[in-house]
Image: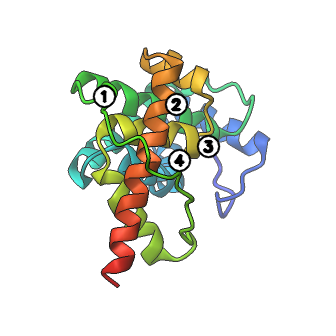
Amino acid sequence: MFKPVGDLRNLSPDAEIALAKACCAGEREAQFRLFEQYKRTMFGICLRFMDNRLDAEDLLQEGFVNVFKDICKFSGKGSLEGWIRTIFTRAAIDQLKAKNKILKTIELQQDIEPMILDSDLNNPNDAEELIIMLQKLPSGFRTVLNLYVLEDMSHDQIAKELGIAVSTSRSQLTRAKEFLKKMMLKSMLLI
């Protein structure tokens, strides 16, 4: 039986394995603790990938269903959070593919200068505004941007995962940054 050890925010590798094993054994308290521990972080991932809050909530539910279905496969190599993030990222990609939302390359003006993200993500208002802007990106742009910048995947990995060419991944990222820059500049003009 899983014995809760106070705050779960900084679990040792042994404690993560114990929590995963307890979840695997179907212990409700352990499953509840795991959900409570990671729901906010995973919901942030869901919001970044989906167009709206309702789709993000659906993805959160689907992601945790997948986590609990596969929790017995967690080996302790790497962190539990990293393992869960991978499941959520794959669930997001699968959901986008299922809805046929991943776009092919969209032609934009070629002379737009590259974008530099300057947002202070420690400021809740900036972080919330950035999430809203990310949700406004076309699905293909948003997906590649999330995978490259926030999930630290290479263009080769993204191409393989999404079934697109490496050059498409690169162009989608460039266009996502350009699109985001336009939105950020427009937002600053309104302040």
Calculate the distance from the C-alpha at mark 2 to the C-alpha at mark 3. Answer: 28 Å
**Mark 4 and mark 3 in contact (Cβ < 8 Å)?**
no
Q: Secondary structure at mark 2?
A: helix
Quarter of the image with the N terminus is: top right
Calculate the distance from the C-alpha at mark 3 to the C-alpha at mark 1. Answer: 26 Å
Front in this rendered view, residue 182 or 124: 182
Per the image, the residue denoted by label 2 is 170
Q: Position of residue 86 (x, y in %)?
A: 55, 32
Whether residue 64 is visible to the viewer of this picture, yes or no, is no
Q: Secondary structure at mark 4?
A: helix
Pair 3/1: label in front: 1
Front in this rendered view, residue 20 or 80: 80
Q: Position of residue 120 (x, y in %)?
A: 57, 72
Q: Secondary structure at mark 3?
A: helix
Amino acid type shown at disc 2: Arg
Per the image, the residue denoted by label 1 is 102
Q: Earlier in the sequence, mark 3 or mark 1?
A: 3
Amino acid type shown at disc 1: Ile
Calculate the distance from the C-alpha at mark 2 to the C-alpha at mark 1. Answer: 15 Å
Residue drawn at x 32%, y 48% is 137
Pair 2/3: label in front: 2
Vertical relation: 8 (above or below) 87 = below
Front in this rendered view, residue 102 or 45: 102
Pair 2/4: label in front: 2
Q: Earlier in the sequence, mark 4 or mark 1?
A: 4
